[in-house]
Amino acid sequence: MIQTAPPTTSEPACAPLPRVLIVGAGPAGVCASMRLVDRGCDVTLVDRATFPREKICGCCLNLAALDALGTIACDHLVTMIVPEPLTHWQLQAGGRTVRATLPGGVAISRYAMDAALINESKRRGVAFRDACVVRVLDVDCDGTMVGLRDHDAAETQCRYDVVIFATGLSGGGVSKWLPYQQAPMGPIGVGFHLSAGEYSKTQVRPHTIHMVCGHNGYVGLVRLEDDSIDVAAAIYPGPQAAGGFPGGSRRDSIAQQLDAILNIAGLHSVAMANVDQLRMTPPLTRRRVVGCDSLLAIGDAAGYVQPFTGEGMAWAMESGIAVADCIVGHASQTARTEQLSRAGQTLAERWIAKHAAMSRDRQWVCKLISRGLASRPVRWAMVPSIRVAPWIASWTIGRLNRV
């Protein structure tokens, strides 16, 4: 008979799980919140926006993103809203068009997806507060002190064992602790929606990711669950965009540059006609230190690489799930050794190493493509190359969709 020794008093039977604040209720933050609460943590999720809300995004989930949602039992929430998958990817550049088959994925508005995921997180026990502004006051290995302020209310100060910033491209005002290794640079993000029925389905086909490349950037278009068209672009602003055209605004100049690309797809003067709806981001390319003591960054707040075929959403969700596992694993190891100094790596060091490994494994294809698209000769050579060797598109799409 095998006998098991009783637990010693120096090693607890179970790990004390941390109290966690997650700032930012996008895909990265909400996936982290559900993974943590499912593992027994006390989790508060906050966002400065009022939900539901729209957001600049390509609105595509590839197979890797759906697989990430499956690991937290949420993939059904998306397929209930969008039962029909994406089937094709189409590229237009240099007056030529090429189409390739997609292995799957869905196009879904952030308005619908974020609301569904947040509602599910609340059902599981996550404390959610929208319209809440967070200010980091102090950070050390034992916890992070923050100020929380709802609209038109006084700030309250709270201390959490771990604070996760999933604030997207806004950064969250934590550069004092998580400085940029590569300051924001490169193209800016631009997005808006076209209403259902405004353009024919021959121009923007259903179940298809359309990608249009021009001299000054590229645009992605996809039809959403309500048949409206999501337009998301990466624009390299020229000198005119920086100062605006004579008699016009910077927004007008960006819209004109966006229209120059959309004209290739037969959508003439679309951006100028919707110039008041344009939403713009800061420069997209950036990289930062992702951990300092008990303060961690995930998703786009940690760094941004221009995504394709839904890779950006997949990366955000995967990083949210990974940081949750990192936190729980570190708490368990710390409890076993009783002292943080004996636990080997600190939490921040563990997350920095994990994030770097994930980035090398998942993002190198996007980095390669984005650098190519930044070069005009490469953009113009892309379609002829794919036509001659169609396996290039198939391999690239398969790599971005791998789970």
Image: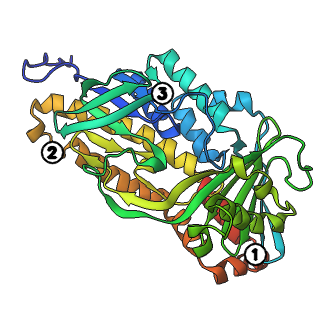
Residue matched to label 3: 131
Residue 213: quarter of image = bottom right
Residue drawn at (68%, 66%) of the image? 247
Image depth: mark 2 or mark 1 in front = 1
x 54%, y 28%: residue: 50
* Residue occupying the point 66% across, 63% down: 254
Q: Is residue 131 above or below residue 285?
A: above
Residue type marked 3? Ala
Q: Secondary structure at mark 1?
A: helix
Looking at numbered disc 2 in the image, what kind of residue is underneath it?
Answer: Gly
User: Can residue 252 be seen by looking at this rendering?
Assistant: yes
If the image is split into quadrants, where does the N terminus sit?
top left
Q: Secondary structure at mark 3?
A: loop
The 10 Å Cα crowd at callout 1, few under 14, some 14 to 19, many 20 or more, is many
Residue 344 is tagged as: 2
Side of 262 relative to 341 (left or right)? right
Residue 394 seen from this side: no
- Calculate the distance from the C-alpha at mark 3 to the C-alpha at mark 2: 38 Å
What label does residue 383 carry, if any? 1
Q: Residues within 10 Å of mark 2 (few under 14, many from 20)?
A: some
Q: Earlier in the sequence, mark 3 or mark 1?
A: 3
| Alpha-carbon span between mark 3 and mark 1 | 45 Å
- Residue 345: image x %, image y %? 18, 46
Closest to the observer: 219 or 347?
219
Q: Foreground residue, 247 or 141?
A: 247
Q: Kindly identify the amino acid type of the residue bearing the numbered disc 1.
A: Val
Q: In the image, is residue 129 above or below residue 224?
A: above
- x then y, percent, for residue 6: 13, 16
Q: Residue furthest bottom?
A: 377
Q: What is the secondary structure assignment of the residue under circle 2?
A: loop
> Could you give the CA–CA distance between mark 2 and mark 1, rounded to whole angstroms?
50 Å
Q: Is residue 109 above or below residue 2?
A: below
